[in-house]
Image (spheres, grey):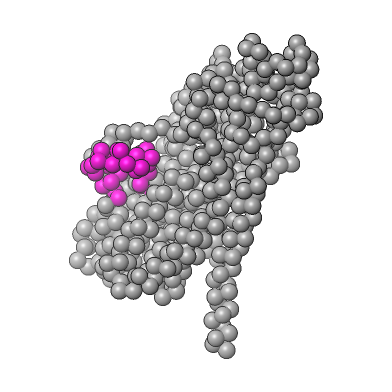
Amino acid sequence: MVYPLFMAICIIVMIPFWKHNTLNSGSDMQFHLQRIYEIYMNLKNGSLFPYVSVYSFNNVGVPLNLVYPAIFLYPFAIFMLLLRNPVHAIYLGMWLILFCSMSVAYWTGMKYWKGNFKKSVLFSFLYTLSAWYFHVLFSGFTLGEGIGMIFLPLIAFGTYSIFFRDEHEWYILALGMSGVVYSHLLSAAMYSVVVGVILALGVFYTSNWIKNFKYLLFAVLSTVVITAFYWAGFIQTMFNNKLNLTMVVDLQKSALPFGNYVTTSLNNDMIGILPIFFVVLACVLWKKLDNETKCIAIIGITFFLMVTSVFPWRLLQDTPVRNLQFPTRLQTIVNLFLALLGTNIIDYLTSSKVLTKKAYICVASLTTIFFISNAFNFFINTASQTEVNYRPSTSKNMPFMGFKVNSQTFYNILGYNLGVGSTDYWKKISVSHNRDLTAHVGYIDGAKKILVPKISPNKEQFKVQTKGSGEKIDLPIMNYGSYNVTINGKKVSYKESKRGTIVVYSKSNTNTVTIQYKPSTVLVVAKYISLIGLVCVFAFPFRQKLFKKKQKS
């Protein structure tokens, strides 16, 4: 069985990280660790889903998991429950991502190359143990993108199957795109470009594309149904509140200079050495490559150029494309197509006797060696990062980036947070009050008061002393409009302050104010729609096989 091999290979490449026993911050590390911690604390306290972040992100109650999908972070939280060492738990989650990526890439390869074992295994190595995957997971700690990469081969093959195969396996596209939506919404938008490219090829090269287009619609509708739970939470939160979204940057400036990109890749960063080598080989062997491999090469090289400032990104700055933020994200697409290209080139060279069959093993071994080498280089380059061996606070903040924690200091970075993404999805009117809110500053009839909540899943409780009833209490928790609010056990109405926070009025001298998030009926219904849709789409290929068997008999 090939899957135990993938498990073993992923363990081998992760051993340096487990021995390192330190988490070195990429740009998004604190952001994603706080998300994992929120799930961990919810599970630990008997709640299955954190609708609002109360244990993390400064306890201000942001409904982060309704706008930034969290489902695939659950393994990390479960590993934290099972292991004493939280750093090892996080790295075990990374191991699982790599294993799933290799497995999905292999399975997709077996579908695409019609059971060719060697090509499928090689593709899984080239795609997963790549310099870019390393950069995403470890250098950037961008877990959403890293998890989303698992599903890109499914999206590409599912679309290809709709237009170029008789089976029209649209459900593969639906499951792949649903997986990405539940991982990283921006990646889903980006991977839709891959769908568009393959659709364009289908229109150009096939005569029955109009007939096959219905299968694409099946995939789109199925994806919408499976992801209904996410869309319900996202749309409700976004449309009912004016939110502070992630920053928009100048695309032309954030694109890499072509020379720098190639040089960095030859140092086995960014897209890496092997993909560059395959591009060179493709140019040398161009006349001998089949048309499909040429198409793969053209797509890969085109996106390769789009990563750089050679592409006129300034023309797209005032379009929705600006939400891409960094053209370097397109390297995920480059990584896919150049892995396909490399696999086909190695197959050509072995089948034409230029190389022996051992070339498959050599290339797969190189990917593993390069991945491990990148790990040691990463440890060297981050050795000087600041150790967060203290509890950050308003008086002693932690570095915005460039810090590290080990198993003893891990929990230090999960409290006070003004790092990357710390005000993402806040109410816009609340951002200017971020110093007060992160310090738990409330107001009682206009007088400043520190109000530290007692926290439980999706709920915060404040003990507030006032002079009597009718005093205005402005609490340090943001209002997203879906709460049960009680004072001393009795339900009360609430308002929104100029800070975007929840305001109530005292009922006595001592007020126990409890604020609990209440999921809407739409959100609850959408959850069951998603589950039913997922079961139906998973069941479809099995139902199809049974139907064909009955027809034959």
| Any part of residue 337 in sight | yes
Residue 315 belongs to the span the image colors magenta: yes
Residue 269 belongs to the span the image colors magenta: no
Q: Position of residue 462 (x, y in %)?
A: 72, 23
- Viewer-proximal residue, 447 or 492? 492
The image quadrant that residue 359 belongs to is bottom left
- Viewer-proximal residue, 545 or 7? 545
Q: Please determine whether, in this image, residue 176 is positioned above or below residue 518.
A: below
Write the residue at 70% across / 34% down. 484
| Any part of residue 109 in sight | no
Q: Position of residue 133 (x, y in %)?
A: 43, 47
Prevailing secondary structure class for the magenta stretch in the rendered image: helix
Write the residue at 64% across / 31% down. 54
The region drawn magenta spans 303-332
Q: Please determine whether, in this image, residue 253 is positioned above or below residue 446.
A: below
The image quadrant that residue 283 belongs to is bottom left
